Amino acid sequence: MSMGKTNNSRSSAQKASRGFTLIEMIVAVALFAVVMLVSVGALLALVGANRKAQALQSVMNNLNIALDGMVRSIRMGSNYSCDGGNCGPGKELTFKPFCDENCDSSDRWLYWQDKDENGVGRLYRSTTGNKGNRIPVTAPEIDINSLEYYVVGTLRSDPVQPKVVIVIEGTASANQKKTETTFSIQATAVQRILDI
């Protein structure tokens, strides 16, 4: 009887120490492959989303810099008029820029929105006061749908300091329109020269 118990315990010990079967190894490798495939796919999706977000951030930074430059120029200037008068809303803004001893005091700057050759709405500037000498201010990835100027306080009889309110709406896209976002921005520029 002790001989039978010894044989049974020996065969149980041999079965326990044999290792994995081929089927168990195939199942383990398949599970590992599925988990790695899902993990790598998620990692690649995150990297792609990060690249798109950075490209879109770069485009929006361009719009912010263009708008800041325009507001700074307007703030330093004087004699604002939109579409030729004290108005709101207007599609074009003209003003006399800040002038030092090296510039012509009769110069007028002009800001307006127009379509470029690709049909994209862009913000333009002219330092001669006419649309023939236009310089694009925004990047081609920014499509401006609406640009309006509200000019108040330009009459000498009013008690309001001259100011310009700018309202811009449009879309910004990056990576050939794969990532697109809409924006609506409002900025105000108050004339620095006292209007007394």
Image: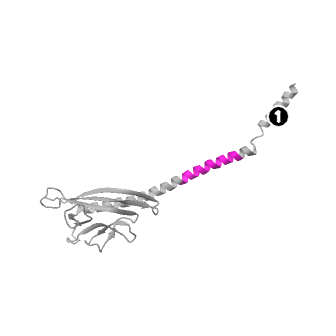
Q: Is residue 38 left or right of residue 99?
A: right
Which residue bears the numbered disc 1? 11
Residue 164: where, in percent of width, then height?
A: 24, 59
Residue 59: where, in percent of width, then height?
A: 40, 60
Number of other residues with Cα within 10 Å of mark 1, as a class: few under 14, some 14 to 19, many 20 or more: few
- The residue at the far bottom in this view is 132
Residue 56: where, in percent of width, then height?
A: 43, 58
Give the main secondary structure, helix, strand or loop, of the magenta stretch.
helix
Q: Quadrant of residue 184?
A: bottom left
Q: Disc 1 marks which amino acid?
A: Ser
Does residue 31 show up magenta in the picture?
yes
Range drawn in magenta: 26-44
Q: Is residue 5 left or right of residue 25?
A: right
Q: Is residue 27 left or right of residue 131?
A: right
Q: Is residue 126 above or below residue 13?
A: below
Q: Residue at x 38, y 57 (%)?
A: 182
